[in-house]
Image: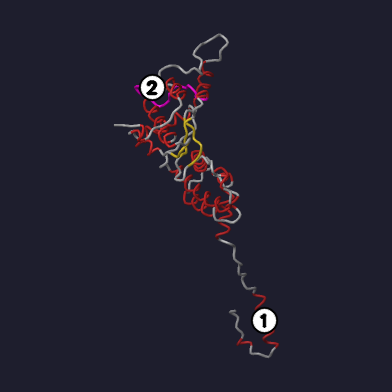
Amino acid sequence: MPQIEDGYTRLANEILENIMKASLNGTQFRIVMAVWRYTYGFQRKEHDLSLNFLAKAIDASRGQVDRELTALIDRNIISVVGTGGRGSRVIAFNKNSSEWTDRPLNSGLSSDSSTEPSSTVSTEVSSTSRTKKESIKEKKKNTRQPKQYAEDSTYFKMASYFHEKVKAVAEDEGLSHLIIKSDLQKWADEFRKLVEINKVEDKRLIADVIDWVTSDPFWKVNVLSAKKLRDKFAELALKMKTAQNPKGRTQSKPDPRDREIAFQQWIQEGKDPDEFDWGN
């Protein structure tokens, strides 16, 4: 039988009272419970919790956890406070319920999803209100969410690879404070923009530039974020190519006039003209 002596999670009554009033579907509530268990349950406020870990903890699919955790983060019920050692997000429960938003749930047509209209979106129409087209545009703008990347996606892997390289450089140079709160989701989005907007589609080139930047004595301490890498990528790629393929001294072709001068000197020295070597 479960006993308090075997372990328990301390929660303020105010947190329980506020979470009872929140419009959460079943999966979202289970995620909140899991976050409580592995933060407050270990007397800590935050912890790195991967999607795979949470999915196993609440016995749900990874995709379902990804979708509903994103909704909780978007509503400011769960906060992302950094990146863990393995690239997973460090998350925390936001106990300040006044900061929670009561937007309509965007996690699909769950059977336990709230169908109440959002308190932040007006459903009334007046003679002075904006046109229907403007209202729809504004609503879409307010509900737009930052793009989220799965941990096994290409862009997230690129961000994690670069982050590990930068992290090692920062630790060696005593600059860890500059990347300690790096958001891998934002880094992944910068890599997406690098490929899709800047049209740098050669991922081998991107990896090579990352390796070069994080080993170059000058650039390794000047490029410590994915945004900086993207902004200066063209310059960095060019400098890398130049460093790897330095221009050697070009051997000029022999001037025929030099051989003619040498031939005249040969004759002046009394040597046989037929023995002069014109080949060198």
Residue located beneath label 1 in the image: 262
Residue located beneath label 2 in the image: 113
Q: Position of residue 240 (x, y in %)?
A: 56, 55
Q: Which SS class for mark 2?
A: loop
Residue located farthest toward the front when viewing the structure as drawn: 5
Q: Residue at x 43, y 16 (%)?
A: 116
Residue 251 falls left or right of residue 200: right
| Front residue of 37 and 32 | 37
Query: Cα distance, mark 1 to mark 2?
Result: 96 Å
Kind of residue sitting beneath label 2: Ser
| Front residue of 140 and 176 | 176
Quadrant showing the C terminus: bottom right
Q: With respect to residue 137, does 222 lie above or below?
A: below
Q: Residues within 10 Å of mark 1 (few under 14, many from 20)?
A: some
Q: Position of residue 192 (x, y in %)?
A: 49, 41
Residue 258 falls left or right of residue 191: right
Q: Position of residue 108 (x, y in %)?
A: 38, 25
Q: Residues within 10 Å of mark 2 (few under 14, many from 20)?
A: some
Q: To which quarter of the image does residue 72 belong?
A: top left
Residue numbers of the magenta segment: 99-113
Query: Tell me, what colour scheme is on the image?
Result: secondary structure
Residue located farthest toward the right when viewing the structure as drawn: 268
Q: Is residue 103 magenta?
A: yes
